């Protein structure tokens, strides 16, 4: 678990230092400016509210805050908050009587997020350093958990779901954007550490994702694809630089960005 986290941490520290995306890319992390996973995920009203500099630091694969139905006064946790964009959007939704915690394990991300928070002028957002597998908040302390393209990176997803369930209040909900597999993929793909850190190899299948949430105690579980990826042979080669013949794999309809929602039962 430590090896995967350390590879992921280094990759995202580099991403924020270079101010480049690295979702969907391989060992050449951050070499390409845009990618099929992060491009154009914020539309409409959300996009209009986001300063360009913060938008450029987004490494998500969807817009979970838009789908979370947040209300003024609610307490929200953003898992793997990165440079803070979704935490800031959530802060705007819950208003001054609400509170948003952003949790991330990477020092460079926490620093970038805190600097962005000061520019954005939001007093109701706080960034915490820690792991999503060991959330540093008490039981039953938040109304909603949002997360954008982070759970796929965890080497222990069952622990993440257990922790989310613990920190949510009864009746609390999750709104998560993440990469999912739409059909089984070769073991070589799932075991590539570069592709893990690039948000691909660690992704769950749709039913696997739903099954793990139900096993953790959630109900009303939904996993809905929002963008099906069509990786080009060049993108596949970049994601899996050491894999022979990877450019010949039929990568159509294999993976998608998805929106995942679920509720913690009231009792
Ligand atoms: C793909 S980026 C997404 C960042 C942000 N959610 C966004 O949409 O821009 C993944 C983030 O999750 C953090 N992260 C990855 N694994 C983590 C873990 N196990 N615990 C805490 N943070 C983690 C990384 O440091 C990075 O900031």
Image (tube, grey):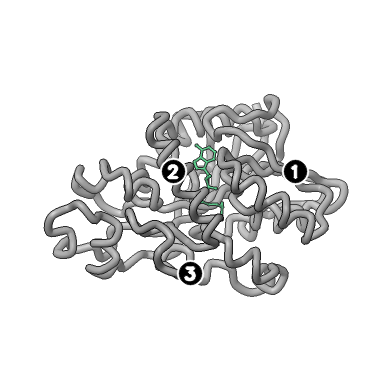
The C terminus - image quarter: top right
Identify the residue shown where x is 44% and y is 34%. Answer: 157
In the image, residue 217 lies at what x, y percent? 52, 29
Q: Dot 3: what SS?
A: loop
Front in this rendered view, residue 259 or 133: 133
Q: Is residue 146 left or right of residue 3?
A: right
Looking at the image, tell me whether mark 2 or mark 1 is earlier in sequence order.
2
The N terminus - image quarter: top left
Q: Quadrant of residue 132?
A: top right
Q: Dot 2: what SS?
A: helix
Using the image, determine if residue 131 lies above or below residue 179: above
Real-space Cα distance between discs 1 and 3?
Answer: 27 Å
> Does mark 2's beta carbon lie closer than 8 Å to ligand 1?
yes
Mark identifier at residue 126:
1
Q: Are marks 1 and 3 in contact (CB under 8 Å)?
A: no
Real-space Cα distance between discs 2 and 1?
Answer: 23 Å
Q: Nearer the viewer, mark 2 or mark 1?
A: 2
Real-space Cα distance between discs 3 and 2?
Answer: 20 Å
Q: To which residue does mark 3 refer?
A: 39
In the image, residue 25 lies at what x, y percent? 36, 59
In the image, residue 38 lies at what x, y percent? 48, 64
Mark identifier at residue 8:
2
> Does mark 3's beta carbon lie closer than 8 Å to ligand 1?
no
Looking at the image, tell me whether mark 1 or mark 3 is earlier in sequence order.
3
Q: Quadrant of residue 56?
A: bottom right
| Residue 260 appears in view | no
């Amino acid at each position: 678990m430590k090896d995967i986290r350390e590879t992921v941490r280094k990759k995202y520290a580099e991403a924020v230092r270079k101010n480049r995306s690295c979702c969907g890319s391989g060992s050449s992390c951050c070499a390409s400016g845009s990618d099929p996973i992060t491009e154009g995920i914020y539309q409409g009203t959300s996009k209009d509210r986001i300063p360009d500099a913060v938008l450029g630091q987004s490494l998500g694969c969807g817009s979970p805050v838009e789908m979370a139905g947040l209300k003024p006064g609610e307490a929200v946790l953003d898992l793997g908050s990165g440079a803070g964009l979704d935490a800031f959007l959530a802060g705007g939704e819950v208003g001054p009587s609400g509170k948003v915690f952003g949790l991330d394990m990477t020092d460079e991300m926490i620093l970038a997020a805190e600097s962005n928070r000061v520019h954005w002028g939001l007093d109701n957002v706080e960034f915490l350093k820690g792991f999503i597998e060991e959330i540093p908040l008490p039981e039953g302390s938040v109304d909603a958990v949002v997360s954008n393209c982070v759970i796929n990176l965890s080497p222990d997803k069952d622990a993440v779901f257990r922790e989310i369930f613990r920190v949510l209040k009864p009746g609390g909900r999750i709104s998560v954007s993440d990469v999912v597999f739409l059909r089984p993929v070769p073991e070589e793909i799932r075991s590539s550490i570069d592709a893990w850190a690039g948000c691909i190899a660690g992704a769950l299948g749709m039913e696997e994702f739903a099954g793990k949430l139900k096993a953790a105690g959630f109900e009303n579980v939904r996993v809905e694809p929002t963008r099906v990826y069509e990786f080009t042979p060049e993108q596949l080669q970049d994601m899996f630089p050491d894999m022979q013949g990877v450019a010949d794999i039929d990568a159509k309809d294999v993976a998608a960005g998805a929106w995942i929602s679920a509720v913690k039962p009231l009792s």
